[in-house]
Amino acid sequence: MRKAIPLVIGFVTGTFMFVQFFVPHEAGEYGYKLLLDWVQIISAFAMILGLASLFHSNWEKVRRRRRDYGYSVVTLVAFVFMVYVGLFRPGEPVQPRGWVYGRDSQGAVGRWDRELGREDQFSLLIESDQDTGHGSWSNHGTGWQVNWGRVPVMARCPYEVSVYCRAQPAGGPVAALEVSYVDERGEPLPREHPRVEAKPDTADWQQLKVPTKAPEGAAEMHIKLSATGRGKVWFDDLGIRQTEGMASISPPNPKFDQPERLPTIRKLADTEDGSGFKWLFDNVLVPLDATMFSLLAFFMASAAYRTFRARTPEATVLLVVAVIIMLGRVPLGELIHKQFPELCEWFMMVPTVAARRGILFGVALGSIATSLRIILGIERSHLGGS
Amino acid sequence: MERLLRIDRRVIFVLIFAAVLVPFLANLKLKPGAPSPSTRDVYDFIGKLPAGAAIMLAFDYGPASMPELQPMAAAICRHAFRRDLRVICLALSPQGFLLADRVLAETGPQEGAAYGEDYVNLGFKPGYTAVVLNMGQSIPGVYSQDTKGTPVERLPVMRGIRNYSDIALIVDLASSNTPATWVAFAHERFKVPVAAGITAVMATEYYPFYQSKQLVGLLNGLKGAAEYEYLIENPDRGAMGMASQSIAHAVIIVFVILGNVGYFGARRRRRVTR
């Protein structure tokens, strides 16, 4: 039974894929797409299985104190550390729930200020030391944060959005409040974005207000709090009011006093600059990998010196062609003789292609034969055992 | 003569190290001469695409192959941005998408291209063949969001991109056998043009595909990268690497010649003494 089921699966899927390639029927197309989705899911699990296997084999080696188990200790430590940094992002700043600092910001830094607020100790801060510095906070999150800052609205309804702001130095940077809308699919609606800006002239909190009307098809409101210029700008106490009917709607985290939910669980593959994961990739993995590969150059040079000898006519042909290719692949060859690159190209395009094509035909025929043997259940070595 | 057969390997190592390092320190750039037909074919194909067309750049390599493939990626991105083409990056290799970030972060701002509008990094998906085949049905179906987590339907660069019929060219930058996968499943099944940028050691494997026009062009190793840089009039790391490679090849050839002179000298001596 343990062997019969995999054989049946192999036969059915193999035959199906073979037939559907030549028979463009609707049912075939559906099954084809379904199978491809399955393959992708299985591939993802295969990666996890591979990682588990790597961990297990090294763990066993350490546990049983096998020869050179010290290398396994290094592997395990690096493995666990990389997974921890990738998943839990230690050292990254905690953000206020529902609000993200804009990726389009330039020359300005956004921080969640937990010492200064209008009525409490929490606010959003944008700071710049450049006259042209620009930064923005918005409720338009991505990834894990995408749902946390949502402000659902009703189409054709009028609203008033307000926020308090404060600047340092007074009369320095410009603070702005901008509102835009998206439809149910998240597509921005092509309407003018209501916006108000001010240059707070005192160190006191000043209110910015934007009257707006949700356009036809609007499903969500995007709020952008931005600052431009040298200095600091704080934002606090956001309010959204439905001006007809005087009902208020609750904006996400309006006092900016709640931390991001599940701040430690982020996407593994988030490549934002500054993350520990990216830092480790750039500063550990890249140099190590490049160093390992670079060592080949030294060993190849040494090996070429020791083994490239014109001992036989065949070895002489190999030696001469190798020298021509090596010179033809670099500008130095052309400096020695202008025909070198052309001669190199001829070798690549004629004798090499002829030999390679023969090998490719052999490989292709072998692959077809092996595939047929697997589909028909003749080849069973992939099932394990003898 | 026999001393030529016993050169200490450390001497070879030091000379190779110097041959590679000195051109970098001296910022020496060597022009690789007339571009190979395989490089020019890629350049011409991209050069003829209409503004707004989308090209897909697959980063199927890791840091080990960066010196050869990263200059290629940068040169192609620059060329595409200058021609107002949309660049959609993705990776079948787990490390590739982080290398794509490096290239895009450098070339995008320098060429006035904006993330999300002119280029995007869709990241890595496991499954190799299944990913390539699935994108023939629906690209947003496979990559529903980019590496920053933004849903692709919100990215202007992805507007109107449904499947391979909306892609003008796929360029696979690879250090493994993925170009064959792209040729077999994207080109042969969905008829999308495919070009490849590969490490020099893989070149012999892919010339048959180029000769049969299954690949519209082929960037072959560091030389291919340098040739492309000169074609777009932006000699950079590829051109710098050419100088190092030239001197390193010369050093290796000199040692091979010394080894053979020593070998024949010793053989002759043995015959005379007999």
Image (cartoon, rainbow, N blue to C red):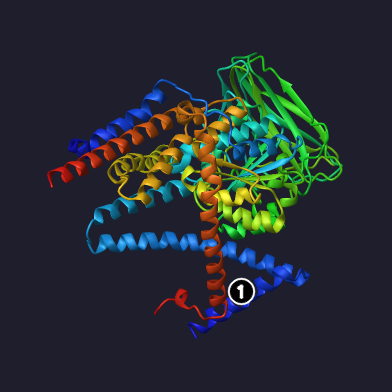
Residue depicted at x 17% and y 41%? B269
Horizontal relation, residue B85 to residue A375: left or right: right
Between B81 and A112, the one lying in front of the other is B81
* Chain under callout 1: A
x%, y% of residue A268?
Answer: 51, 49
Q: Which residue is mark 1?
A: A14
Residue depicted at x 56% and y 46%? A349
Horizontal relation, residue B93 to residue B252: left or right: right
The residue at the far bottom in this view is A1
x%, y% of residue A98?
Answer: 62, 42
Between B162 and B55, the one lying in front of the other is B55
x%, y% of residue A150?
Answer: 69, 45
Q: Quadrant of residue B25?
A: top left
Residue A268 visible in the displayed image = no
Between A197 and A79, the one lying in front of the other is A79
Horizontal relation, residue A191 to residue A369: left or right: right
x%, y% of residue B237?
Answer: 50, 29
The residue at the far left in this view is B273
Q: Is residue B196 above or below residue A202?
A: below
Q: Quadrant of residue A364?
A: bottom right
- How many marks the image carries: the answer is 1
Crowd class of label 1 (few under 14; some 14 to 19; many from 20; radius 10 Å): some
Q: Quadrant of residue A296?
A: top left
Work out which quarter of the rendered image holds the N terminus of chain B and state it: top left
Residue B22 visible in the displayed image = yes
The amino acid at mark 1 is Gly
Mark 1 element type: helix
Horizontal relation, residue B199 to residue B216: left or right: left
Between A279 and B8, the one lying in front of the other is B8
